[in-house]
Amino acid sequence: MTYRGWFLTTTVLAALALWPDTGPALADTAGGDDDGIDDRSEISSGANGTSGPPYSETAQLDTGEEEEAPEEPLLLEADDLTVDETLELVILTGSVRLAREGRIVLADRVTYNSRTEVVTATGNVVIIEESGDTYFADYAELEDGLAEGFIDRVGGLLIDDSRVAARRGIRRADGSVTMEDGIYSPCLPCAQNPDRPLIWQLRASEVEHDAESMDIIFRNVFFDVFGIPILYTPYFSTPDPRVRSRTGWLTPSFGSTSTLGQFIDLRYFVDIAPEQDATLRARPTGERGVLLSGEYRRRFESGRIEIDASANQSEVLEGGDEEFRGHVFAQGRYDIDENWRISGELNRTTDDTYLEDFDISDLDVLESNIQAEGFHGLNYHTAEVLSFQDLRGNVEDEPIILPWMRSSIVSEPARYFGGQLFADSELLYLRRPGEGRRSPLEGIGTFRASTDIGWRRTIYTPIGVVADVELANQASFWATQDLLDDNGQVAGETSDDTQAFLTVPRLHASARYPFVRHGETFTQVVEPIVAATIAPSFTSSDFEDIPRNDSAAPELDEISIFRPNRFAGIDRYDGGSRLTVGGRYSIDDGSGRSASILLAQSFRAEASDLFDPATGLADATSDIVGRVDASAGRWLDLNYRFRLDDETFEAKRHELTATSRLGPLGLMGRYTYLSDVAERQREELLLSGSAPLYGGWSTRGLYRIDLEADAVTTWQAGLRYTCECIVLDIAYQEQPQRDNRSILLRVSLANLGDIGFDFGFDAAENE
């Protein structure tokens, strides 16, 4: 007879524990059948006390002892159940399933011995722990409600998909598992050759999975690569995959550079609390002493904070005295409420070369700030304090801004005459340190207040013309201390009385009229674009009492040419009446292949001495700017931006970028040409690519050349191997202009961490 269903096996265990009393009842319910097979419904009837053990809850309460909490019942499912009264065995066969307290046992056959209370499972045994870890075996003996026992020839799949295997495994009541002659690896066997050794594995005489401390401990460990022992250690420990974070040592990294000599990075992670942690680092070096550093991170309910700092005692310049060196990078944010938040950054270092010497950062300018922001519907308000540290050397000192307050208020769209009112205002005080006065900007202080009030609207006409109209007035006031005039003298009668006021009313309108043609296989769009600006005209003399803090380097391109002010800031204003015309043409076949071109040029009544001739905006007719985009699906994307002289059509700027994906092969190339940049031309070519090789291997490379100087600035080549259990990176980089070469090797082992080797050396030392 075949039976299916779930049972409360506590009743079965209680009945078998008092076999002499319950045996006759079991025989009677069997109807005298000699096959020993009993109906499950009759066995479970002992739960109501009619044929169960002779005790009751009342009798237990009379003892005066505190009643223990009842254990969770053992649930079971099987195709067949057999009771052997002589041997006091219950035998379950055929797709047996036992479950208790989150632990599940599957097997082909399970035997329960009522005398020893031992469960024996054979045939395709699977034990699924509450944690999600799964163990496999052909034979297992379990007792104490499946809580402990041993398993022969055990294999395990942990929740992070890593695998363990052992000759024998012992499970204790606390959930810990000890395996003899164990192997651990997250690597998958080769699909084509399953018998081939794994990429890497840990092989130990004993592997202990401690459930209480959540550690996996290895004793007498060999680290094998493709079956070949590479390293040995008598003891190794790693956290259980369920551990989110744990205080302890991280994998070190090693290296050598011409600046530091040989070094080792030692890192210790401190798990302070679920919401905060820290990493402490020590880097002993051969040439620059010991670098001590640390990182602290913490999250709050409404914010976060991160701090990264370091300290060192070494020479700034070769042959100089040793002195304290260090840096601090810190950032944080706090949400005050749903409308306001405060954030800030602190980025400082002791000298210009410290970050580069210790390979901490490649930033040229460090910015520190603290900012309060408010969001109220469409309106935005902010107050900010900024300071900068320039690490480039021989450049003018960066400013200190204290404060910079801005407010942007806008009405609901289409509320006033079909458009929107806006008011943008700001208040700024800026001070540039510097006593040498190497440039007119050094050593000055500027107070600036500005308000821009206006109305704007987007109009969609019935014939398809889209027009944007803006009518506004900007009023600004400057008060500057220690401003130099053209003769290098402080402007004004005293150092505090240089003041200027400027008001700029403007009308700016643009219109575009797209013509669309739909073909059988493609769509074409021709879109003329016209923009007109009416504003007062200005000359350089109108700004002689206004320092050029935020408007030093205007850039003419296909985007800025349509703006009412081509300067980046408001310390200079591109005034006068002008007309900008342009057009865009595009074609698209709807399958990923497309092309477009945009051309534009600006015209004004007369030339302007506000712009440097190199910008292309000084003449009455501006340079021609444009952009070409083309796509041939995944295999080719082109982007070409250019600026041409309006008379000779000589190239002033070229920037061509091409990317291609030819199957798995990825290529990218960029050519950049800029004329008259800092009194010199810039011409550069950058090529990079990546390609897969075989069996998880891929290669990548980069080549950058300064065509103006006819010199290679950087070239790199590297290999990467990637699979489910390891990432191996090998890269070589050379910077000939800096006489610098470096080799990077980094190995990342799944679930164990990564280790890196960084070797740098001067090219001159090896010639």
Image (cartoon, rainbow, N blue to C red):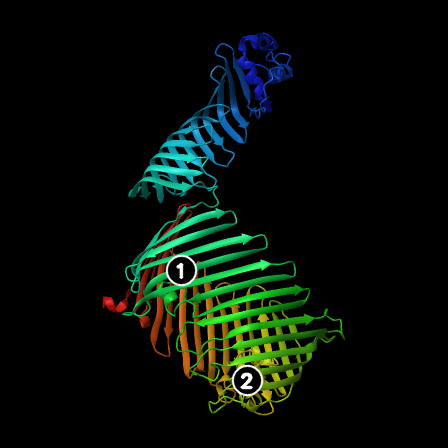
Looking at the picture, tell me which residue is in the foreground, 684 or 464: 684
Q: Could you tell me which secondary element the residue under label 2 belongs to?
A: loop
Horizontal relation, residue 338 to residue 221: left or right: right
In the image, is residue 246 above or below residue 665?
above
Q: Distance from label 2 to label 1 (Cα)? A: 41 Å
Q: Which residue is nearer to you in this view: 313 or 101? A: 313
Q: Inspect the image, locate mark 2, and give the three-letter code of the amino acid beneath it.
A: Asp
Estimate the x, y position of residue 452 in percent, counting from the top left. 66, 78
Question: In the rendered image of this protein, does residue 106 appear above or below residue 696?
Answer: above
Q: Position of residue 561 (x, y in %)?
A: 57, 80
- Residue 381, horizontal then vertical, whole percent: 64, 68
Q: Quadrant of residue 538?
A: bottom right
Question: Of callouts 2 and 1, which one flags the residue occurring earlier in the amino acid sequence?
Answer: 1
* Furthest residue toward front: 494
Look at the image and tell me in which quarter the C terminus lies.
Answer: bottom left
Quickly name the residue at label 2. Answer: 496
Going by the numbered disc 1, the residue's amino acid type is Ser
Residue at the spot of label 1 = 310
Q: Nearer the viewer, residue 539 or 312?
A: 312
- The label on residue 605 is none
529 shown above or below 155: below
Q: Nearer the viewer, mark 2 or mark 1?
A: 2
Q: Is residue 1 visible?
A: no
The N terminus, quarter of image: top right
